[in-house]
Amino acid sequence: MIKELTEKRNDLVTEAEKMLETAKMETREISEDELKRYDEIKAEIAKIDASLKMEAEVRELGMKPVKEEKKVEKELETREVMSGLEVRMDEVAEFANLIRRTDPSNLTKEDSSDVIPTTIGRWIIRKVYDVSPILQRSYRSNVKGNLALPFYSTEDDHITVGYQTEFVDMVSHVGKFETVTLGGFLCGALVKVSKSLLNNSDLDLVSFVVDQMGLDIARFIEGELIHGTASAVDGLSTLDNTVETAGVGIITADDVIELHDSIKDIYQNNAIFVMSPKTRTALRLLKDEMGRYMLQDDISLPFGRSLLGKPVYVSDNMPEIDNVDGAPVIYYGDFGGLATKFSENINITVLREVFAIQHALGICAYFEFDAKVIDEQKLAGLTVKSE
């Protein structure tokens, strides 16, 4: 039931987003019919949220520990992570019960003394990576099979408007429709977990593994959106709308202004900057002709900084200024010009028997996605001149 309700909720959100995007594309206000439908969508989502909350509460009541051990006959092998990379806490609890369902009868303290230290802290320190909201701001679709997105091209010809003479035939001039097709590329990740560590009650290893897998998947997807891979996901690697710096190996204030102005004003409302942490530091040192720093304080924006009035996000996946492959070191624009399609939700599966002889459990994740630029007018990249 959770899966069906969540899918229905995602469809409603997508419908509302498309309704708003259509109005923006047509540069008009929301119509009365659209407002009426939007109110209906909000009401339906509220009912679904209430149902999901009730389902979670009932599950929580059913998962309270009992004194008498009971054999669980129904094996749950697959859990789906819905709504992107978010993990529901009730599903994490059920996931924990699943992978702890093992036979420790052959495990002794002596056997595990070299695996489990005397005391395991309740906190796990991990390396943190910066991930920007490129995926969240892209044009997202969850469909099976290939997805063809039409766009109107005016490169070869366009609708011509001009003066006309009576009784003289008009000449037809029009653009043409083309399509961008998104397929699906299967990706996966595997983690082996020690059963000895799972049996240690001081460490909530299940939540950590699931959460870490989600973060690493998010980092991988963003890296593919930025760099792409030959014969696989294109991402932003095919973007032709780029600006090159005037100087060699440096970025100036004029370069940033030129990048900003390479996007049409109609697409500036939702535009953001994306760059590496080191590039942001370099830009923080830039000053305009009046001696003012380009990066200004703005508590209303993420991280309290703005560049030419726009939010600045950082990502460890972005190239540095001294990169030699000519890839953009800064992206700017409305990332709705990038389309992402997920053919398969992220599925997390527990492998119980495969690694049994290693006294371990396997946790694997699969997902299928693709990404391509569908509107180059919305996006631009800044490359650094190498020589």
Image (cartoon, rainbow, N blue to C red):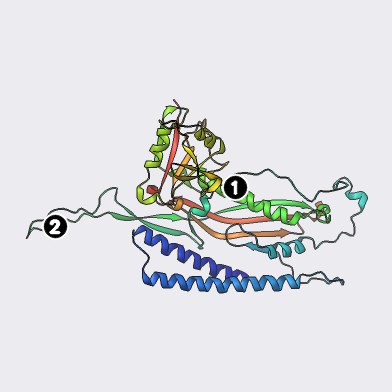
Amino acid of disc 1? Arg
Q: Is residue 1 visible?
A: no
For mark 1, what is the residue? 219
Q: Which of 249 and 284 is in front in this view?
A: 284
Residue under pointer 2: 170
Q: Which residue does the image show at 38% across and 37% down from the upper left?
A: 258
- Kindly identify the residue that appears in the image at 66 percent across and 52 percent down: 213
Q: The N terminus is located in which quarter?
A: bottom right
**Residue 332 percent coordinates (x, y):** 44, 44
Q: In which quarter of the image is the C terminus?
A: top left
- Classify mark 1: residues with Cα within 10 Å, few (<14), some (14-19) or many (20+): some
Q: Which amino acid does label 2 sit on?
A: Met
Q: Do the residues labelled 2 and 1 touch (CB within 8 Å)?
A: no
Distance between the alpha carbons at the discs numbered 2 and 1: 55 Å
Residue in the picture at 29% in, 51% down: 154
Mark 2, other Cα within 10 Å: few <14 / some 14–19 / many ≥20: few
The residue nearer to you, when weighing 317 against 237, is 317
Is 344 above or below relative to 154? below
Instruction: Establish if 28 lies above or below 160.
Output: below
Q: Residue furthest top?
A: 387
Q: Where is residue 204 in the image (x, y as percent from the top left)?
A: 77, 55
Q: Where is residue 259 in the image (x, y as percent from the top left)?
A: 40, 39
Instruction: Indicate the position of residue 4 as horizontal and vertical percent values.
Output: 58, 71
Residue placed farthest to the left in the image?
A: 167
